[in-house]
Image (cartoon, rainbow, N blue to C red):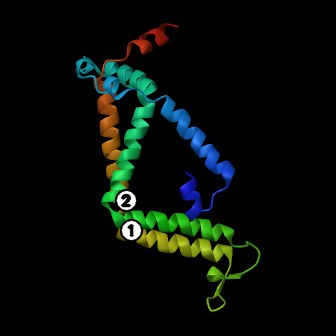
Amino acid sequence: MQAIGKYIPLEQETIQSIQSAAAQRFQTLKPWSEFLDRTRFSVPKSYNEFMVRARLNWNHFNANYLLIALITIAWSLISNLLLLFDVLFIAVGSRYVSTISPNQPEHLFGNQSFPLITQTQGWLALALVGAILLYLTAAGSTIFWIVFWTALIVFGHAGMMEAPLEADFAEQV
């Protein structure tokens, strides 16, 4: 995380918060041998059984499902480099616009040869350019496919896998 702070200035408190949240989430990650145990996969007898399995498995494997979603997002960004550029442009642009004083116009990038802009104008320009770039890189389609494939994998796994024994005991308590 410290390497990101070199290029995108983040407050130390923010970095520590992200690190602690990630560490807590990864501590609840279940072993992949348990997650992919083929002996526990079967077709549920009814819709109700499917939903019970999905709920119990969601509670048990939610960190694994989150990691699958993050991998899907990373794969989508890596396979569409223009979209990755757009996302980075918007993130860095947002950080830059937030540093502009809200009450006083400043020269763009601090260069006297560039025009004066206000923070509101910066946000408007960033939104306009970002929307055009996201449209040109088919971000809507990419988001649709990320949601579709993640939901298919998560709900397919959660509903088809028999609930773990720990979930059965948790239900009785």
Look at label 1 and name its amino acid: Tyr
Say which element carries label 1. helix
Give the residue displayed 32% in from the left and 22% down from the top. Answer: 50
Of label 2 and label 1, which has the lower sequence position? 1
Query: Picture quarter containing residue 132?
Result: bottom left
- Image vertical order of residue 141 relative to residue 104, above or below: above
Give the residue displayed 32% in from the left and 62% down from the top. Answer: 80
Query: Which label is found at residue 135?
Result: 1
Towards the viewer: 16 or 131: 16
155 sits left or right of 91 in the view: left
158 sits left or right of 94 in the view: left
Query: Which label is found at residue 140?
Result: 2
User: Badge 1: how crowded within 10 Å, few (<14), some, or many (20+)?
Assistant: few
Query: Picture quarter containing residue 112?
Result: bottom right
Q: Position of residue 6 (x, y in %)?
A: 58, 62
Look at label 2 and name its amino acid: Gly
28 sits left or right of 83 in the view: right
